Image: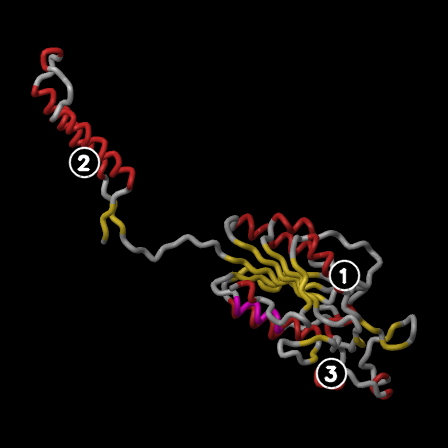
Amino acid sequence: MKISFSWISLVAIAILGILALYEIFPINRKNLSSDETIYMRVRRVLICVLLAICALCPCVMKSTLQRSLNATNVIFVLDVTGSMNVNDSKDLNNNTTTRFNSAKQIIKQITNNYINASFTAIRFGASSSVDVPLTPDSNAIENWVDTINTEPVGVSNGTSLDAPLDKTLLEAKAIHDAHPQDVTVLYLISDGEETTSRKRRTFSSLRGYVNHAYVIGVGSKNGGKIPNTTTKLNDLDDINSTDSSTKQSGKWIIDPSTGKPGISKMDPQNLKNIADEISGKYVDSSKNHSIGLEAK
């Protein structure tokens, strides 16, 4: 325990002390011109002393473990369209892997870097859904990453990058309304490929509810063939094979306009545009393996 006094109290005490001394030792005052009595002087001195005691106002300082912190809420938005199975991305060890595996590694790395944060996860493809409601349990995100899969290619009528906008906006607004002092960080992970003719809606409405945003691109500009997701998972090992028998085995999605396996390419410009709309930052996962370290 420690007792201390503020500088304001010390200044007030000094002034009162000077006034008390002035009453005790009057300067250049003639008794004949004043009706002041000893009783009056004593009374004024006592007033100064009492005011000085009041001004002391000692405060007791003791250590406490309580402190005010702004909590952090992390929103993951993950692309689960069939093109995320293209094997043209880089993992955290710079090895070639599918875009989806790269995205899942990134989410795990980000989660591990945010200590004592809360997380929510949204997937999008033909539709979007909140898979993990806001929770402080990082294991919930780990389990989600371990179990989530891409959607079958057959259910999609084309990829629209604004598919998760409504769900993400509702989730971000709910977090902001419930915890207005918290910091909300958005991570959107996609290959940026858009295959619909409909004009994409802007993400700018998220700016009012998100403090920091990162749009992460997975894949490559050269692209790769899209595997048929009805194929067994262990058949994806030879997904890069150029042998003609592989092309005829039904492992690739065929482009109806050419009759050949379709090529999916990462579109960084689409992702950069989204990042600009939410005042965020675009990150190419193949060039930056330190994603998530901004949390520290």
Horizontally, residue 242 falls left or right of residue 184, namely right
**Can residue 53 be seen from the camera position used here?**
yes
Tell which of 143 and 26 is nearer to you. Answer: 26
Q: Which residue appears at 87% of the width and 72% of the height?
A: 255
Q: Amino acid at mark 2?
A: Ile
* Rendered position, 46 above or below 146: above
Identified by mark 1, the residue type is Gln
Secondary structure beneath dot 1 equals: helix
Q: Which residue is mark 1?
A: 269
Helix, strand or loop for the magenta stretch, by majority: helix
What is the CA distance from the residue labelled 2 to the residue labelled 3? 83 Å
Q: In x, y percent, where is residue 285?
A: 67, 70
Q: Amino acid type of disc 3?
A: Leu
Lower sequence index among marks 2 and 3: 2
Determine which residue is flagged by label 2: 53
The image position of residue 129, as x and y in percent, is 66, 61
Q: Residue furthest front?
A: 28
Of all residues shown, which one is farthest toward the top?
33
The stretch in magenta equals 105-113
CA–CA distance in space, label 3 to label 1: 29 Å
Question: In the rendered image, which quarter is residue 146 located in?
Answer: bottom right
Give the crowd class for mark 2: few <14, some 14-19, many >=20 residues within 10 Å: few
Residue 95 lies within the magenta run: no
Q: Secondary structure at mark 2?
A: helix
